[in-house]
Image (cartoon, helix red, strand yellow):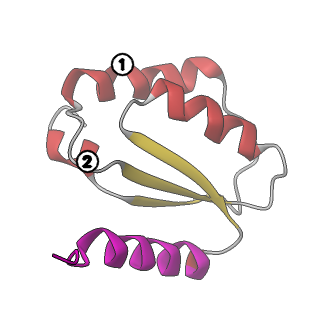
Amino acid sequence: MRSFPETAAYDSIWHLLDFDGDATNDDVLVMQVAYLEVAVTGARPAYTCLVTHDPCMKYWATAMDEQFPGRIHLVMRSVEQAGEWLEQIRGRLQAPTAA
C-alpha cells in the first residue's frame, strides 16, 4: 500500500471462500498501520466486500470498520453478489440530485 497509496481509497472485493481462518489481530495490524500512513478520507467511504461463508466474519468486518477509518467492510456470499452491490452503491452515489 505504501508503494501505491491511492489504493487505500479503492473499493475492493476479497475472495475468502478458501480462507482457512489462520489470521490474527497482528496480521491485520500490519495492514492497518500501512493504511493509516496513506489513507485520506474522501467525500464517500471506500468499501471492502469480504466474500465468505464464515458466519463469524461479520465480527471481523465490524472491527475492521474501526481499524480502517473511511472504509466500510461488508460480508457477501459470492463474488457476483459483491460486484452487483458495489455497482448499485456506485450508481446511487453518482446519481444526480434533484434541483
Q: Quadrant of the C terminus?
A: bottom left
Q: Is residue 68 above or below residue 78?
A: above
| Mark sitting on residue 95 | none
Q: Is residue 55 above or below residue 39?
A: below
| Mark sitting on residue 9 | 2
Nearer-the-camera pick, 28 or 70: 70
Q: Residue 74: x, y in percent?
A: 59, 54
Q: Residue 46: x, y in percent?
A: 35, 50
Q: Is residue 91 magenta?
A: yes
Disc 2 residue type (three-letter): Ala
Q: Is residue 89 left or right of residue 75?
A: left
Q: Is residue 81 visible?
A: yes
Inter-mark Cα distance, 2 to 1: 15 Å
Q: Residue furthest right?
A: 55
| Mark sitting on residue 33 | 1
What is the magenta range?
Answer: 80-99
Q: Find residue 71 and report its image quarter.
A: top left
Q: Residue 69: x, y in percent?
A: 39, 30
Q: Is residue 38 left or right of residue 54?
A: left
Mainly helix, strand or loop, the magenta region? helix
- The reply to whether discs 2 and 1 touch (Cβ–Cβ < 8 Å) is no
Residue at the spot 54% in from the left edge and 47% down from the top edge: 73
First in sequence, mark 2 or 1: give its number.
2
SS at mark 2 in the image: helix
Q: Quadrant of the N terminus?
A: top left
SS at mark 1 in the image: helix
Nearer-the-camera pick, 63 or 34: 63
Q: Is residue 4 visible?
A: no
Disc 1 residue type (three-letter): Val
Q: Is residue 1 magenta?
A: no
Q: Find residue 17 and report its image quarter.
A: bottom right
